[in-house]
Image (spheres, grey):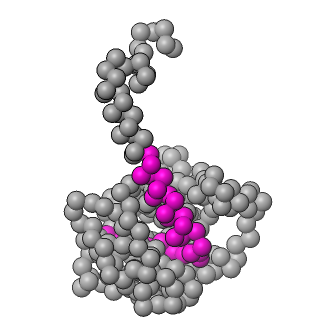
Amino acid sequence: MEQRGKNVPRLREVGDIERATAKKARESWHVLTIMAEFIESTERLSELRPAVSIFGSARIKPDNPYYTLCVDIARRISDAGYAVISGGGPGIMEAANRGAYDGASPSVGLNIQLPHEQHGNPWQDISLSFRHFFARKVAFVKYADAYVVLPGGFGTLDELTEALTLMQTGKSRMMPVILVGSEFWAGLVDWIKTRLVDDGMISPKDVNLLQVIDDPAEVLAAIQKFHAEKTPPAEESQIESERQSGMFL
């Protein structure tokens, strides 16, 4: 490979020592800040379970029906003994924290530092601040026993597909992923069932990773039913053990 004339010099081979040193120092500091976020989230959240992560748009206002619906769902989940994890910001994130804050279990906000849109809401019993999206994403899925996903944009879709990919590939344990807002999600669900399945991009059984539920009581019941009936097979027990040791999420 390296004899084809396409070599890229290693950093230690760069002639400009000052530039190479500065780049290594910058990347080393970057790695240390990432490590610090993983350590802080482990310290604050590792004993949190059971917990449910709730996602949705930061742009939804308190007068939106989805906001009110999310407050109701989060309050029911919190009173049932599940901590509620959100992104800590406005919109659906705020609604999730608001409902949980008034409930019996902790309200958790995984805040992200952004130049716009994100500002922390006041309904957080536990508040963490992240600079790096991927460290925050790990915390969302690692400490959750279910995902509840309300209408949202790219960030919401990112968190949704991340969880589905991890479960599909066996890199995380199985958990309920519930889409709230059947009218909003109808087009995506139909596309998954037809285009992705029909074109062989996913297996038909992968569709079962998703549930669509609009009623708050039924959302909670689906989460409770899943965990009451779940008897992990040997391989999933192994994944859970390795997840606890840090190998998997």
Residue at x 38%, y 37% (from the top left corner): 25
Relative placement, left or right, of 78 versus 116 is: right
Who is closer to the viewer here, 145 or 32? 32
Can see residue 92? no
Q: Tell whether position 53 is magenta.
A: yes
Where residue 186 sits, quadrant-wise, is bottom left
Who is closer to the viewer here, 72 or 214? 72
Relative placement, left or right, of 43 versus 240 is: left
Give the total of numbered labels: 0
Q: Tell whether position 200 is magenta.
A: no
Residue at x 47%, y 90% (from the top left corner): 103
Image position, residue 206 (x, y; %): 57, 57
Image position, residue 178 (x, y; %): 49, 72
Residue at x 65%, y 76% (from the top left corner): 227
Image position, residue 240 (x, y; %): 68, 61
The region drawn magenta spans: 31-57
The C terminus - image quarter: bottom right
